[in-house]
Image (cartoon, coloured by chain):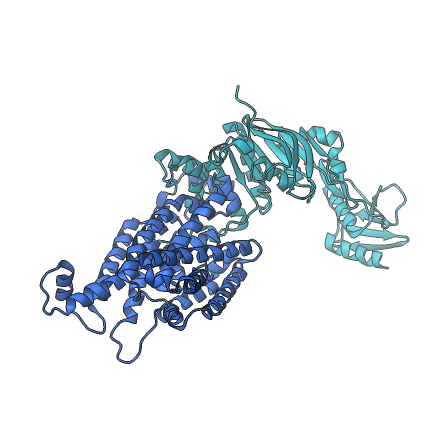
Chain colours: A blue, B cyan
């Protein structure tokens, strides 16, 4: 060995490890996002010419007047929602995977989104029985309350997972997360039993994830909260990097593990909480995004990955949403079905791939 | 004069809600010295290292790093003074060695963890010092356990600590690498004037290379001193004494205890005779002098295709090589 060391010392210190500039890939992702975003506005049950879309967006003159409300009132909020929520969920996937040191972690797989939904269900019950549909009565306040309840539900599941993660292995934690998901789905059904029928129907109508349902008013809450969440996530790049080495090493590098965990849970609560409150349980975007970004950038460095998952998450969500509302002649695809079609194979691949298996200690 | 890198007084170590494992300990580490922590399994070596590095709170007593109580140091300041290499397995996909070593700069970098020119230079030096230049572009997940430990050492060096604490760094390494790492640690201590504390099961290397030895025993006794002193005082023998092992102070190594089988005498005193005696010991024979009374004698003949002769009672048997000789002796013993 000592010979080997001195031999390679004569070579230039291996700066060759420096990657090609990431900003090129970032720009590519951003361009793809812009393209899909525009397609979201043009494609749908009614096809709209790109000229008319531009006209509607810029306030110019469109060929027909029906176009403007379709673009501005339906497609634009939906596309904005997908853009913002996708970025949020992609970020959550990356953070969860690092915090739980589990490459298969995801807000949906670990049951976190069901905890969020449970929070909202409880709120619906409490307000429904106490003040008769507070949600509809108090408008913005009701929407805020929903986001808050959802965030609290997120923290509840994260806490349970944290307690479990100390006792069980990587794969067992996934099973545990899955069970937590079922448990909270069951609890939601029980809770719904105490709500009047119309509200229960309204609640279950978005038990499947969708970016189509959020109102403008909800977007006014969602966009700023997610923006705050993403900035906070970006501030966690350095602590998350040291957590890659495990808690003991992270601590030895000067990290306060306790404080980092509190901050990241807060970030997750804000992001998963708000998105789930307004879009329902969206599947797989977190895990798919994180894996695609690692493959694309060939690194685990959060300084590179954090902007990447935001872009990739937005791109993935926009694309999945686009597929669900393409003008299919007969069928209607649910978004989680699309996400599952893409996401499940990626999770399976991660489980079976040898290099991943090694880092899972299977 | 700068205060000592590490001092402990009346220190008790252990986990909460359980009896303390070791203590009271009054320890000190000096700058520029390599200290080896030795002791059988389960004597609390890792617990002591975790306490000294501030990861685990002391049960009672004080640990001071450069004059400040370790629990009063900010995490960042502590990380600037002290680096550790643990037995924790680091399993991360898609992380190259260079990026991992760069993480060692975290206590010195800004809130985003960006590397300055100085940081990059320190990382380069750390990689060379740990002898992992040829691994720099490799992925952590692809490395062997031994390679990974050397990378973790490079990362610790990148921290530029005053004090380096390593837990069984040599456990996964083969003999040449063990020697390389231990010599590297000693040289680092000398050259950079830092104090290095390493726990190891490699008694032989520790005795040869350590400036000071800390010896933890199963009975809870703790000895510290120059390695030679501990050998001469018999502390080594006592701490590691067991039914099967005996510390040979003359040789400075451990020997498998003398079995009580049939007595065998080997002719001669050369290298061949020495190794035949070792083989006999393994087979369960007692080694006795050629001139004394023996159950079996192994005579040596200078010429011929069968240089070894087993003499037992009136019977003799010639053997072409040592394997044949041992096979015959096994059969004899079986009877």
Percent across and percent down for residue B329 are 80, 55
The quadrant where residue A220 appears: bottom left
The residue furthest bottom is A330
Q: Is residue A83 visible?
A: no
Which residue is depicted at the point 23% across and 66% down? Answer: A74
Question: Is B197 situated left or right of A45 in this image?
Answer: right
Q: How many marks?
A: 0
Where is A86 relative to A303, above or below?
below
Which residue is depicted at the point 42% across and 68% down? Answer: A344
Which residue is depicted at the point 47% across and 71% down? Answer: A193
Where is A317 relative to A47, above or below?
above
Where is B314 relative to B208, above or below?
below
Where is A8 relative to B162, above or below?
below
Taking depth in this image into account, of B106 and B228 the one nearest to the observer is B106
Taking depth in this image into account, of B47 and A297 the one nearest to the observer is B47
Percent across and percent down for residue A89 are 37, 58
The residue furthest front is A131
Percent across and percent down for residue A110 are 47, 61
Percent across and percent down for residue B245 are 76, 43
The residue furthest top is B1
Q: Is residue B251 visible?
A: yes
Question: Is A32 situated left or right of A305 in this image?
Answer: left
The quadrant where residue B133 appears: top left
Figure quadrant of the C terminus of chain B: bottom right
């Amino acid at each position: 060995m000592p010979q080997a060391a001195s031999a390679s010392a004569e070579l230039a210190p291996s700066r060759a490890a420096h990657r090609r500039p990431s900003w090129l890939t970032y720009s590519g992702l951003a361009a793809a996002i812009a393209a899909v975003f525009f397609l979201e506005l043009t494609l749908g049950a009614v096809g709209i010419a790109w000229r008319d879309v531009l006209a509607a967006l810029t306030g110019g003159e469109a060929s027909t007047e029906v176009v403007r409300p379709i673009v501005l009132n339906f497609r634009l909020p939906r596309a904005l929602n997908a853009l913002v929520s996708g970025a949020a969920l992609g970020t959550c996937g990356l953070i969860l995977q690092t915090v739980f040191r589990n490459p298969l972690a995801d807000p949906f797989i670990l049951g976190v989104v069901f905890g969020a939904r449970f929070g909202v269900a409880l709120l619906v019950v409490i307000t429904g029985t106490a003040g008769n549909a507070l949600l509809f009565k108090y408008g913005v306040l009701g929407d805020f309350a929903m986001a808050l309840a959802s965030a609290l539900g997120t923290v509840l599941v994260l806490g349970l997972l944290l307690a479990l993660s100390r006792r069980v292995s990587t794969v067992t934690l996934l099973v545990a997360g899955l069970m937590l998901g079922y448990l909270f789905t069951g609890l939601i059904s029980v809770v719904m039993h105490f709500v009047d029928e119309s509200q229960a129907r309204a609640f279950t109508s978005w038990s499947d994830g969708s970016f189509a349902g959020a109102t403008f008013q909800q977007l006014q809450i969602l966009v700023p909260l997610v923006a705050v969440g993403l900035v906070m996530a970006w501030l966690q790049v350095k602590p998350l990097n040291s957590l890659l080495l495990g808690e003991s090493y992270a601590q030895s590098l000067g990290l306060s593990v306790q404080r980092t965990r509190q901050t990241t849970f807060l970030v997750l609560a804000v992001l998963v909480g708000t998105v789930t409150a307004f879009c329902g349980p969206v599947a797989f975007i977190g895990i798919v995004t994180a894996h695609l970004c690692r493959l694309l950038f060939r690194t685990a460095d959060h300084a590179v990955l954090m902007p990447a998952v935001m872009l990739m998450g937005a791109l993935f969500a926009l694309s999945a949403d686009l597929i669900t509302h393409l003008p299919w002649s007969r069928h209607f695809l649910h978004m989680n079905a699309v996400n599952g079609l893409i996401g499940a194979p990626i999770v399976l691949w991660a489980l079976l791939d040898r290099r991943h298996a090694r880092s899972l200690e299977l | 004069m700068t205060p000592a890198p590490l001092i402990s007084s009346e220190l008790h170590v252990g986990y909460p809600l359980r009896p303390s494992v070791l203590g009271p300990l009054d320890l000190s580490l000096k700058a520029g010295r390599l200290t080896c922590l030795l002791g059988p399994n389960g004597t609390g070596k890792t617990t002591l290292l975790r306490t000294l590095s501030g990861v685990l709170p002391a049960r009672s007593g004080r640990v001071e790093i450069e004059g400040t109580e370790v629990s009063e140091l900010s995490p960042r300041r502590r990380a600037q003074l002290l680096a550790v290499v643990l037995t924790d397995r680091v399993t991360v996909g898609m992380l190259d060695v260079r990026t991992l070593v760069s993480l060692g700069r975290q206590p010195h970098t800004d809130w985003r963890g960006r590397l300055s020119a100085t940081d990059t230079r320190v990382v380069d030096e750390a990689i060379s010092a740990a002898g992992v230049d040829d691994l720099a572009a490799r992925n952590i997940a692809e490395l062997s356990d031994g390679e990974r430990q050397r990378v973790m050492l490079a990362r610790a060096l990148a921290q530029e600590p005053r004090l380096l604490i390593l837990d069984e760094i040599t456990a996964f390494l083969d003999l040449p690498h063990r020697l390389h790492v231990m010599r590297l640690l000693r040289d680092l201590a000398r050259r950079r004037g830092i104090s290095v504390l390493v726990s190891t099961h490699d008694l032989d290397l520790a005795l040869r290379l350590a400036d000071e030895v800390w010896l933890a025993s199963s009975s809870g006794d703790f000895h510290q001193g120059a390695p030679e002193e501990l050998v001469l005082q018999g502390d080594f023998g006592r701490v590691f004494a067991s039914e099967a092992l005996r510390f040979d102070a003359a040789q400075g190594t451990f020997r498998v205890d003398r079995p009580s089988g049939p007595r065998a005498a080997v002719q001669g005193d050369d290298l061949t005779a020495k190794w035949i005696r070792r083989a006999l010991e393994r087979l369960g024979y007692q080694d006795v002098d050629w001139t004394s009374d023996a159950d079996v004698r192994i005579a040596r003949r200078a010429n011929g295709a069968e240089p070894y002769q087993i003499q037992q009672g009136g019977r003799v048997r010639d053997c072409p090589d040592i394997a044949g000789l041992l096979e015959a002796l096994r059969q004899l013993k079986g009877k």
